[in-house]
Structure formats: C-alpha cells, structure tokens
Amino acid sequence: MKTTLDEMQAFVTVIDTGSITAAAGQLAQTVSGMSRTLRRLEQKLGTTLLRRTTRRLALTEEGALFLLRARGVLDAVASAEEEIAARRTHPAGRLRVNAASPFMLHAVVPLLSGFRARFPDIELELNSNDDLIDLIEQRTDVGLRIGALRDSTLHARPLARFALRVLASPAYLKAHGRPRQVEDLRQHSLLGFTQPESLNRWPLRHPGGEDWEITPALRASSGETLRQLALAGEGIACLADFMTRADRARGDLVQVLVPHTVQQLQPVNAVYYRNTELAARIQVFVDYLAQALQRAD
C-alpha cells in the first residue's frame, strides 16, 4: 500500500475540522507540514482530492470516494487496536501448547479445569510429542520442556523442578528381590529410554561417582511407557516425581536405593519465541502453570 495511515488520518482530519490550519492544530503538526502531507498523498494517488479556495475546501469526486475508504481503513485499525487492548485485560484466542506426553498427562491436564474457569475465552489446543519440535514449523505458541535446554533462540521461563527416583512395583520386588547396593542393579531388569542416552544415567552414588549408567533390558521413547512397564512389574525405572506422585502415594511404586540416591532436580521450562510484546494468552498460561506447579512441588 503506497498510502500511509498518517496520510489518511491527515486527510480525514482536514475534512472533519474544515481546514488545514485546524487539522494541523488537532494533530500537533505545522500548517506547512500538513499541506505537504496532502500534496504527497495526492501525488501518490495521482489525482486531486481537494479543491482549495480562499474560503473553503471542497472534495472532488475522487476525494469523496477516498474519504469513504479512508474512514473504513482507520475505523478497522482502531477496532483492531481496541480488540488487542481488550485481550490484554481479558485474554482470548487460540493457544497451542506442546509437551511430552507424560508431562501433559500428569502435570498439565490436572491443572486445566482451574485455568479454563479463570480464562474462558482462551481456546486451548494441546499437542503431545516425546521428541523436540520446531515451534514455528508446528505453529506452537508455547512448548513445555523437561531437562536442559538446547535451543538458545528460544525465550525460556522456569516453571518447576522435579526430583528423580529409582522405582519398582511391590510385585517386581517380591519376585526378584530388592537391590541393596547400586551394583545389585546388574542383576535386575532395568527399564530405560531409547534416547537421549543421558536419561539412562541414574542419580545413584557409588564408588565410581554420583551417576550410574544402566544397560536397559527394555527401552521406550516415552516416560509414560516406562511408568506403565514399571507398574506392570517388568522392571526398575528412574522417573520424575511429577508422573509418579500418585503411584507412590498408593504404594503402586516403591522407591529403592534411597540411601544411595543423589538429589537431582530436573528442570521444566516454558519456551516460546519472543520478538515483541508477549501475547496475553501466553503470558497468563505460563504464569498460571508456574504458580500451580510450584504449589504442587
């Protein structure tokens, strides 16, 4: 578009006030500056919009048509600005959230009832993926990431930290015995991740250090799959508190090697691209999660 909003505003203000001088005063410009703006607008459009006499200004036929369209454009911009301003105080619109399946199921979903009651005009779209995704490519507003962050182009907001525990079901321990020393794990069925390999180093203190690299008898890409396998008595797993809190409270999973466990807190961050002011719907969602997760931690 060749014509600028400032030029449209100047033209409409001249018509509404009845003179260039009055329009200049209303828009805090000089009379000469206002005249130059009108001339520039007419040059861009290649037509005369106003006929100037010593007494008054008269619209040409083209000027009347342009005035009608310019008012429509300015009104639309004003409406858009008012709508965006309203969203700052009453957040609305679609919010696309991505997280690993276990975190979505066990940490996010239980909090959504309260969030939706507080912000009913935000339309949530939840996507689960156990692999990292490109937020822009997948049209995602905010991603929830567990562990160390790799992408430095993303803005990150810390949400919570969760401990890791080595766990097994009572049925498995009854059948195979409880490990007493870290080295005893070599005699057990260990449940580990397909990737990354760093998740197969458990926070256990032993003569060689403070993490124990396991050789899984069974691997899975999702922590939720490993949780289900542990509950089914298929072996010992190392899982984050956010997905096993209820299991431990019921006694369905039992922590082993407690004296040898090193406290290792796994960070959870909300990540998003932030080039300008953060949209209100993202801001309130991240704030809500941070407060709720810290209370539950």
Image: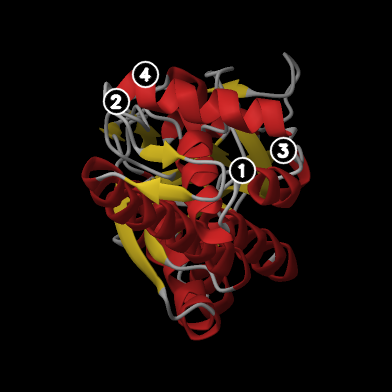
Instruction: Inspect the image, locate mark 2, and give the three-letter code of the amino acid beneath it.
Output: Leu
The one of 127 and 198 positioned closer to us in this rendering: 127
Which labelled disc corresponds to residue 45?
2
> Which is closer to the viewer, label 1 or label 4?
1
Residue at left offset 75%, top offset 37%: 262
- Image quadrant for the N terminus? top left
Q: Position of residue 81 (x, y in %)?
A: 51, 57
Q: Mark 3 and mark 2: span between their CA atoms?
A: 67 Å
Disc 2 crowd, CA 10 A, few/some/many (<14, 14-19, 20+): some
Mark sitting earlier along the chain (3/1): 1
The one of 273 and 243 positioned closer to us in this rendering: 273
Residue at left offset 61%, top offset 43%: 20
Q: Mark 1 and mark 4: span between their CA atoms?
A: 18 Å
Instruction: Answer above or below: position of 224 versus 79.
Output: above
> Which is closer to the viewer, label 1 or label 2?
1
Q: Secondary structure at mark 1?
A: helix
The one of 208 and 24 positioned closer to us in this rendering: 24
Q: Secondary structure at mark 2?
A: helix
Which labelled disc corresponds to residue 178?
none
Q: Secondary structure at mark 4?
A: helix
- Image quadrant for the C terminus? bottom right
Q: Position of residue 257 (x, y in %)?
A: 66, 46
Residue at left offset 55%, top offset 69%: 86
What residue is shown with label 4?
43
What residue is shown with label 1?
20
Q: Are marks 3 and 2 in contact (CB under 8 Å)?
A: no
Q: Position of residue 287 (x, y in %)?
A: 66, 60
Which residue is most to the bottom?
117
**Residue 266 placement: quadrant:** top right
